[in-house]
Amino acid sequence: MSEFTKSSTAKRLGLDNTPSLAVIKALTYLCLHVLQPLRNWYGKPITVSSGYRSTKVNKAVGGVSTSQHMKGEAADLHLPSLEIGRKWFDYIRDNLPFDQLIWEHDKSGTYWIHVSCKTDLSKNRHQVINNLLKQ
């Protein structure tokens, strides 16, 4: 849970980033059905760079008002390399339940994978956005 709630922005600004019981349930589901299976397949630890965000933390980091991070349904994964990131992306897309799977980057050239999953599998859209992949 500490991996999901850790936020340098929350710490710096003195913002509470404690999840509710409903959010903890969603985070647990995300772990059990997406992140742990990915770690088991990869065989090494995977770092969550952004997990749960309270409304105030989400606003402070510039997150969209509908961010699944606020519901405990999403995690951003730090990529050890672009090559490994592509393997993770493909594995999640082809083998795991998800709502959104997005290959993201910022202006500095840092890449990460955003993956979300709803606890009601029938509501997962299986939306893949990979047009940001470096060719």
Image: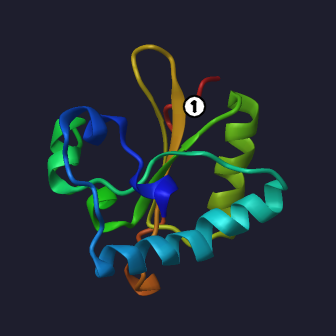
Helix, strand or loop at mark 1: loop
Q: Is residue 7 left or right of residue 116?
A: left
Query: Mark 1 = which residue?
Result: 133
Of 126 and 28, nearer the camera is 28
Q: Horizontally, is 86 left or right of 125 in the view?
A: right
Give x and y (percent) for residue 114: 47, 48
Q: Is residue 10 visible?
A: yes
Split into 4 quadrants, where in the image is the C terminus?
top right
The three-letter amino acid code for the residue at tag 1 is Leu
Mark 1 closeness class: few <14, some 14–19, many ≥20 residues within 10 Å: some
Count of numbered tags? 1
Task: State left or right for residue 91 relative to residue 123.
Answer: right
Residue at 42 percent of width and 53 percent of height = 51
Q: Residue at x 69, y 40 (%)?
A: 86
Q: Position of residue 63 (x, y in %)?
A: 23, 42
On the image, the x and y values in percent for residue 66 come to 19, 57
Q: Quadrant of residue 35?
A: bottom right
Residue shown at the point (70%, 49%) measured from the top left: 88
